[in-house]
Image (tube, rainbow, N blue to C red):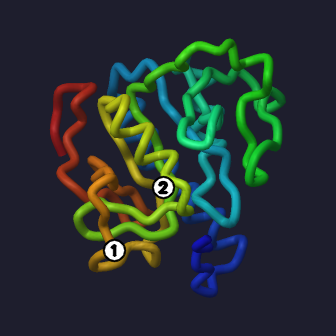
Amino acid sequence: MLKLRENGISSRERREKSSRIASSLINDLLLPATVRSVGLYYPVMGEVDTLSIFDFCRKNSITSMFPRIVSDDEMMFLPVNSKRELVKRKYGIYEPGVGAYTGEKGFVPDIVIVPGVAFDKNNFRIGYGKGYYDLYLSRHRPTLMVGFGYAFQVLESVPVDQWDVRLDLVLTENGWQGNYKNIFAGGSQ
């Protein structure tokens, strides 16, 4: 399994960069928009922290959802109202607890925030090797798919297979990559 390259950044720098990335998403997409739901992930292994976005969504009546792995080839997004509802499960990742899973197909968030080990200039990504996000995104097609990473994770190109899904945007501490258009507010940037 690939691991997120540390690239020599300190915990403090990682927190600052995560904060800039989260602020960009909030200010550019969530504040001016009519977003009703956001699919987040619980950060592990040095990933960009999404928990401040979760807090923002809770305070602004935007439904926050987190992925739950339900089989070897399927995950779903389920609503979460409190961090206490997340439990450590498969691969050491925090997911909605058993009370959140009703056996239904889950929900499709308006925006899905996607973690990755690396991203390329065409908005493809390398994940952690199991394909959960690519399968989910190809089956459910949320309105907007945004990769979250640090600038050092963006490469010229990454290997792409036929099942890999191209993200709409990638957001790093240096800003947006891709054809950014706030489709929720009807404007463009």
Identify the residue shown where x is 44% and y is 26%: 109
SS at badge 1: loop
Position of residue 120 in the picture relative to residue 50 (left or right): left
Nearer to us: label 2 or label 1: 1
Identify the residue shown where x is 27% and y is 26%: 184
Going by the numbered disc 1, the residue's amino acid type is: Val
- Residue 19: quadrant of the picture: bottom right
- Between 93 and 35, the one nearer to me in the picture: 93
The x and y percentages for residue 172 are: 42, 62
Going by the numbered disc 2, the residue's amino acid type is: Ile
Using the image, determine if residue 108 lies above or below residue 166.
above
Identify the residue shown where x is 48% and y is 30%: 38
SS at badge 2: helix
**Position of the C terminus by quadrant:** top left
Q: Which mark is residue 158?
A: 1
The furthest residue to the front: 72
What residue sits right under mark 2 in the picture? 21
- Between 91 and 116, the one nearer to me in the picture: 91
The x and y percentages for residue 131 are: 49, 52
Position of residue 46 in the picture relative to residue 31 (left or right): right
Assess disc 2: are there few (<14), some (14-19) or many (≥20) residues with their C-alpha within 10 Å of its C-alpha.
many
Number of labelled discs?
Answer: 2
- Between 103 and 30, the one nearer to me in the picture: 103
The x and y percentages for residue 30 are: 41, 32
Task: Determine the CA span between mark 2 and mark 1.
Answer: 22 Å
Using the image, determine if residue 140 lies above or below residue 163.
above
